[in-house]
Every structure is written in structure tokens, then in C-alpha cells.
């Protein structure tokens, strides 16, 4: 079981940790459905490179699953909120909705350590047997606040056609704002859970993206990045479930008519606002 560790009255290194910003190391030893054994150190910016089918996407998805779960537990502890779902069941739910078949065998561990002294402040570990969470442990720091939205931008989310389809499915289901795991489960029939949260994150960012576009257009260096696309503003009509943009001639167009390069740059801008 997880526990909220007691902090000593004297000041410790742990007092320096204010807001959860992800883990600093991963220890993964999986034997099924593929062999993946890695000990990795993560920094503020971590770049991964390698050939296809070497486990990059697997690692990224497992990192998201662990971070998302841990941030939920921090949120519950920090705000004194009761569990909506038992912890093992929640972890299982996250894994099942993140992979087509989460039939893992092995151990997965993520920790946060002091960058200099390597003292462990908190972490999460789980043992998987035939795709089921057999063991689950985590440690929370009493001084640590939860982070904001935990986002993983998969390939599907970097395409406005998929985002457009998402908002239409959401409308057909009669879902306005997501406020329960039942709604997440419904949407996860069509999209992975990390895509559900990433798209919701991007839809929220649409409210602030137009001031950013205007700011970029006022600076020569950044305007060179977007001037060829002829975009003056973006619009999200929630009621009609439509995403569109206004071009430099004042014409409103469906956002999916943009080229893939323009879509990727716009999504990058949205995540930066």
C-alpha cells in the first residue's frame, strides 16, 4: 500500500522538493510481451533515439502511466480527496486503456532522487503477472504538490483530423466536460487514455493560442515559421464540435485542410501557451 511519509521537524533535503515534476530514474525489467530491460536516468529534457522496435514508445507510455497514477495519488493526498477507485484497480485501468494488450510480465519502477546526492525522495513500483498488477507500492512526500496536466503527445494527437473526430465522438456520447472515470472509459473505447487527456489539454489551450499567434506574427524570426500557412486565428466551436481557422483572406476553413507540417507546428504552439 502507498503511504504518506512523515517529515521530520528538522529541515531536510526533501524540503527542497516543492512541486512534482516527474521522475528522475526508471528501472524496467519486462520479459513479456517483449524483452525490455533498462535503467534510465531522466533530466529536465531527455532525448531518446534508436531504431524502430527497440522499446521507445513502450518506455514513453509506461512513463506516462506511472506519472499519471502518481500525480493522481499526490492530488488525493495534497487536497485530502477520497479515492474514486482503489489504487490497484486504478493502475490496472490506466495500463489497460494505454495498451492494446497490457499483457506484461516483469517489474516497473520509477523514482525521484536528489540530483546531486541521489537520495530517493519518492517513487512507485509495480510487479506485473500475465498483464495483471500483482504488487503495487508507492511513496509520497508530504512536502510535494501535484503537477499540472500530465501529457503524452502520441502520433495520433499530432493530427487535427483525429482531434476533430474526437470532439464529434464526444458530442455524440453527450459528454460535455469530463468529470468521471466512466466518461474516460467510454472515450477510451475509441482513443487511448493518454490521447483522451492530451486532446482535452489541447482543446483547453485553444482558448489562449490566438494571442500567441499574434505575438509570433509581430516578430520576424517566429513569423517566418507560420507566415506560409496563412493562418490568422484558430476557432473551436464546442457546440458544433468543429475546429477551424481563419486564413489571411478572412475565410473560415476546416482545420483538417491544413498540411501535416502546419498541423504539427500549430499543436507545438498550443502546447507552449
Image: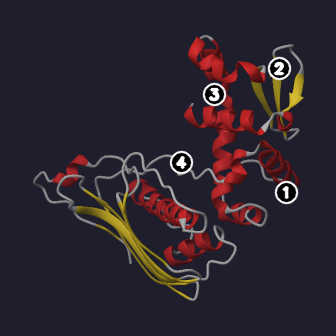
Residue nearer the viewer, 28 or 97: 28
SS class, disc 4? loop
Give the Cα separation between the discs numbered 1 and 4. 24 Å
- First reached walking from the N terminus: tag 1 or tag 2: 1
Identify the residue at image location x=12%, y=51%.
Answer: 11
As measured in the structure, the alpha-carbon distance from the residue carrying label 2 to the one carrying label 3 is 18 Å
Circle 2 residues within 10 Å: few <14, some 14–19, many ≥20: some
* Badge number at residue 149: 4
Residue placed under numbered mark 3 in the picture: 208
Tell me the residue that label 1 is attached to.
173
Quarter occupied by the C terminus: top right
Q: Secondary structure at mark 1?
A: loop
Residue at image position (66%, 64%) is 181
Q: Nearer the viewer, residue 107 or 135?
A: 107
* Mark with earlier residue (2, 3): 3
In this picture, residue 255 sits left or right of residue 110: right
Q: Nearer the viewer, mark 1 or mark 2?
A: 2
How far is mark 1 from mark 3, CA to CA? 27 Å
Q: Nearer the viewer, mark 1 or mark 3?
A: 3
Res. 87 in view: yes
Q: Residue 60, position in %: x, y?
A: 53, 61
What secondary structure is found at the residue carrying circle 2?
strand
| First of labels 1, 3 by sequence position | 1
| Circle 4/circle 3 CB separation < 8 Å | no
* Secondary element at image label 3: helix
Residue 220 position within the rendered picture, expressed as x and y whole percent measured from the top left = 59, 12
The residue indicated by pointer 2 is 247
Q: Using the rendered view, name the quadrant where residue 235 is placed.
A: top right
Query: Could you tell me residue 64's position as x and y percent?
Result: 52, 60
The first of marks 4 and 3 along the sequence is 4
- Going from N to C along the chain, the mark reached first, 1 or 4, is 4
Amino acid at each position: 500500500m502507498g503511504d504518506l511519509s512523515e517529515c521530520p521537524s528538522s529541515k531536510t533535503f526533501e524540503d527542497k522538493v516543492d512541486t512534482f515534476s516527474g521522475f528522475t530514474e526508471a528501472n524496467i525489467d519486462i520479459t513479456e510481451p517483449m524483452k525490455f530491460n533498462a535503467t534510465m536516468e531522466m533530466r529536465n529534457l531527455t532525448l531518446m533515439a534508436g531504431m524502430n522496435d527497440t522499446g521507445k514508445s513502450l518506455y514513453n507510455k509506461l512513463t506516462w502511466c506511472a506519472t499519471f497514477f502518481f500525480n493522481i495519488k499526490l492530488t488525493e493526498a495534497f487536497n485530502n480527496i477520497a479515492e474514486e477507485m482503489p489504487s490497484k484497480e486504478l493502475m490496472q485501468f490506466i495500463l489497460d486503456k494505454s495498451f492494446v494488450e497490457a499483457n506484461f510480465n516483469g517489474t516497473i519502477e520509477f523514482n525521484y532522487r536528489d540530483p546531486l546526492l541521489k537520495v530517493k525522495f519518492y517513487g512507485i513500483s509495480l510487479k506485473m503477472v500475465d498483464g495483471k498488477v500483482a504488487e503495487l507500492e508507492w511513496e509520497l512526500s508530504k512536502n510535494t504538490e501535484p503537477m499540472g496536466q500530465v501529457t503524452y503527445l502520441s502520433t495520433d494527437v499530432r493530427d487535427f483530423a483525429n482531434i476533430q473526430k474526437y470532439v464529434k465522438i464526444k458530442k455524440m456520447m453527450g459528454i460535455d466536460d469530463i468529470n468521471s472515470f466512466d466518461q474516460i472509459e467510454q472515450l477510451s473505447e475509441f482513443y487511448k487514455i493518454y490521447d483522451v487527456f492530451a486532446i482535452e489539454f489541447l482543446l483547453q489551450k485553444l482558448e489562449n493560442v490566438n494571442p500567441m499567434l499574434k505575438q509570433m506574427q509581430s516578430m520576424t524570426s517566429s513569423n517566418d515559421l507560420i507566415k506560409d500557412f496563412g493562418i490568422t486565428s484558430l476557432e473551436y466551436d464546442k457546440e458544433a464540435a468543429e475546429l477551424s481557422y481563419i486564413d489571411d483572406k478572412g475565410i473560415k476553413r476546416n482545420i483538417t485542410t491544413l498540411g501535416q507540417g502546419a498541423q504539427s507546428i500549430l499543436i507545438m504552439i498550443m502546447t507552449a501557451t
